[in-house]
Image: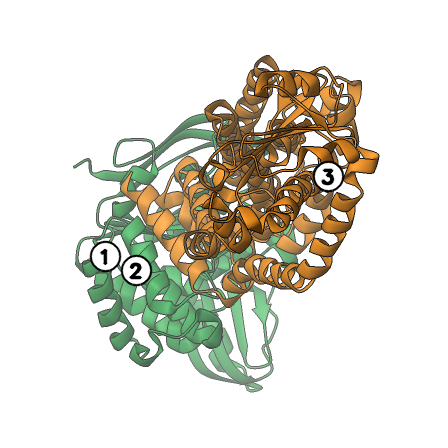
Amino acid sequence: MPNSVVSVESFAISFGHKQVVKDLSFNVNHGEVFGLLGANGAGKTTTIRTLLALLEPTSGKLLVNGQRYSPILSNTLGYLPEERGLYRNEVVLDTMIYFAVLHGLSKDEARSRALTYLKRVGLADKANERLVKLSGGQQQKIQLGVTILHEPSLMILDEPTEALDPVNRALLMDIINEQRSKGATVMLVTHRMEEVEQLCDRILLLKDGVAAEYGTIDEVKDSFGSQVISLNFSGKLPAHNKLYKVTKQLPHYAEIEWHKDVSTDEVLRFLAADKDLHLTTFEVRRPTLNDIFLDLYKDQGADNV
Amino acid sequence: MSKLRDVIGFEVRRNLKKKSFWVTSFLPPIIVIVIITISVASGNNANKTNQQQASTFTQTHKLAVLDETGLINKQELTKQHIIIEPTEKTGIAAVKSDKISAFFYYPKNVVNAGIEIYAQDQGISFSSSYSTAATQLLKQNVITRVSLLAKNSQIVQLIQNDPTVTTTAYKNGKQTNGLAGIIAPGAFMLAFLVLLVLMANIMITATTEEKENRAAEILLTAIKSRTLILGKILSILSLGLVQLLVIIVPLLIAYVFFKSHITLPGGVSLSHIPLDPKVICFGVLFFVGGLLMFTGFLVGLSALFPSAQEAGRYLGPAFISAFIPIYTLSYIISSPHTLIVNVFTYFPLTAPTMALLQNAAGTLSTTQALISLAVVAVSATIAMTFAMRAFRYGAMEYGRRISIKELFQ
C-alpha cells in the first residue's frame, strides 16, 4: 500500500476561460486526518470532485491509492458531498441497503450493518419509515450512516458539519475518530477552524485556486508569522505606540502585537501599572488557525469566508 | 454487471411499491372493459344495422354464389339478380377482376367447413355485412326447406347455430388481409403509444429525482454513469413490461375462456387473425427500438433540467412527436408514397409510430422497414449515449438548466 492515499500533482482545472485551480500539488498520507481549507470559491469542492473523477482535470494527476479514481474502488471510499441528500420518498432501510450494496457489501451484510447503525443512533424504530417523514437531524444521521456503513479506508467529507445540529456534530466527530482509530484516512473539507485544530494532522489552505499554506498545523502557524498577546480585562486599555499596537479590541478582550525591540515583560509591566486597567488574563500565544484564515482571506469579503 | 442488477432491482421495486404506478397500469384495462361493456350493450343495435345492410345487399351489390349444399333455391337467387357461378375458381376470378362485389361459396359440408367469402375490400364497415348477408341467405333457405330435414342432417345444425365464415378480401385484384390483417401489427402500435403515455412520467423523473434529492454525486462515485443510466432504462422497460402484462393478461383470459362469445369489430374471428412472421418481426423490432429510443431521449434530456416539473414543460413537444404520425393515417392508406409519409418514416422521433402504422396498414415495404429500423437503432444508441453524458455532467448542476453546448465543451 503506498504511504500516500491521495496524491495530487500539478493539478489545474478551468471552466471555459475561468481557471479555478492552478498548479496544485499535495499528498494525503495513510491514516492521517487532512484538512483542505479555503474560503467559498477557493476551489476545494472542485478539487474533490476532480479527485473522484466526477470532473476531468485540465492538466495534472489526481490519484487515489496510486490510480485514477473509478467507481470500481467505491468499496474503499466514504464520500459525504457538500450537496447531499438521499431518495426522500424511499424507506430508510431500503435506501441504506441500496447505497451499501453499491459500495460493495452483500445485501445481508448491508441489512445487518444498517440495523446496527440505526440502533446506535437511536433510529431503530424508523427503519421502515420513508425518509421524508424523518426530521432534518434524523435525515442527517442516515446520510452519515450511508457514508460509513461499508467501513471505507478513505473518507472524504466536504463541509461535513454544515447545517448539522450539535448532536449530529458530536456524532460525526465520534465517527471520524472511530474510523481513524481503525486506520482510515480522512480528508476534511471545511472552513470551520476549530474543527481543524481539533482533528487535523496536516492542512492545505487554498486561496484563488493555489496553495497558500501547506503542512502540519504547527508548520503553518510558524510560517504564518508573529505571536500575539491576548488580554482579558476590565477598565480602559491604554494606547502605547512605542510598545505595541492593538490588532483586535472588544469591550473586555483585546489582542496586541508588540514591537520587535520590546519584550513581553515590558508590555506586562506597563499594563499592570495602569490604574484604569484591571487585567484578568495575559497570554502570549501563537495565532490560531482562525486568525490565519481571517488574515489570509480578509481581502475576499465576508460573503466568501 | 452486479451493480447493473442492483440498480434495476432497486428502481423496479420502488416503482412497484408506488400506488400511482398501479393506478396508471390498471387504467387502460378498465377503459377497455368499459368500452367492451358499452359495445356489448349496443351489440343488438349493431346486429340490427348489419341485418338491415345485409337485406339491401343484393340491391346495392353485385353478388355471385356457388352452393354445393343444395339447400339454396336457385330460382330465388335469380330473382334477386344473384349470379350462380359454375366453380369456385370462376367466382374468385370474378371478384379479382372487379366484375362482382362478392362471391359466397357454400361447400357441401358447410356446417364443418364454414362459408367462404371472397369480396372487394371495402373497409371496416362492410366486413361484417358480407358475413351477415352470406349467413342470412343460407339460413332463410334452410328455414323454407324444413321438408328436406330427413334427407339433409345439416339443416338441424344450421337452424341451431350459424356456420363459421371466413372472408378473403381483394383490392385492385390483389388479396388483402382486410381488417383481420390490421389487428396483430396494430396491437404493437397501440402497445407502443399506450406504454409511452404510461411511462412518460417515470422516464422524466428517472434522473431529475437524483438531482432534486442531491443524491447524484454519491451515486456517481459508487457506480459508473453508463451502468446507472443503462440500469434505469432497463428498469423502465421492465416496468413497461409489467404494465403491458396488466393489459394483456385480462385479454388472454378473455380469449381463452370467452373466445366464442367475443366478436371483434367487423365480425373478425380471433382464430382467423393472420400472423405474418415478417410483419410480427417488424412490429416487435419497432416496438422495442422505439421504446429504447424514447426512453434514452427523455431520460437524457430530463438530466439537463434541475427538476421534473421544468423538464416536463420542455419535453412535452418531443413527446408529442410520437403521436403526430396518427394524423397522417389517411395518407398512409390512400397514398403511402407521399412526401409527408416518407419524412415521418425516416425522421427519428416519428419513425417508430409511422413504421408501426404502415406495418399495420400493410404499406410498409421491406426496404422502407429496414432503413427506418436503422434510423431508430442509430437514434436509440445516440439517445442512450447522450443520456449517459447528460447525467454524468448535468447531475451536479443543482438548480440550474445546462445547455447541450455546455455538455460537449
The correct choice, above or below, for A80 with respect to B57 in the image is below
Q: Earlier in the sequence, mark 1 or mark 2?
A: 2
Q: Quadrant of residue A208?
A: top right
Chain identifier, colour orange:
B
Mark 1 sits on what residue? A107
Q: Are marks 1 and 2 in contact (CB under 8 Å)?
A: yes
Task: Inspect this view and state whether residue B364 appears.
Answer: no
Is disc 2 placed on a helix, strand or loop?
helix
Q: Is residue B347 left or right of residue B279?
A: right
> What kind of residue is marked 2?
Ile
Question: Which of the two residues, A161 or B178, is positioned nearer the viewer here?
Answer: B178
Query: Who's the residue at 54% across and 64% down the image?
Result: B23
What SS does tag 3 mark?
Answer: helix
Outermost residue on the right side: it is: B60
Residue beneath label 2, please? A97
Determine the residue positioned at 50% across, 77% down.
Answer: A271
**B183 horizontally vs B278: left or right:** right
Q: Is residue B140 left or right of residue A140?
A: right
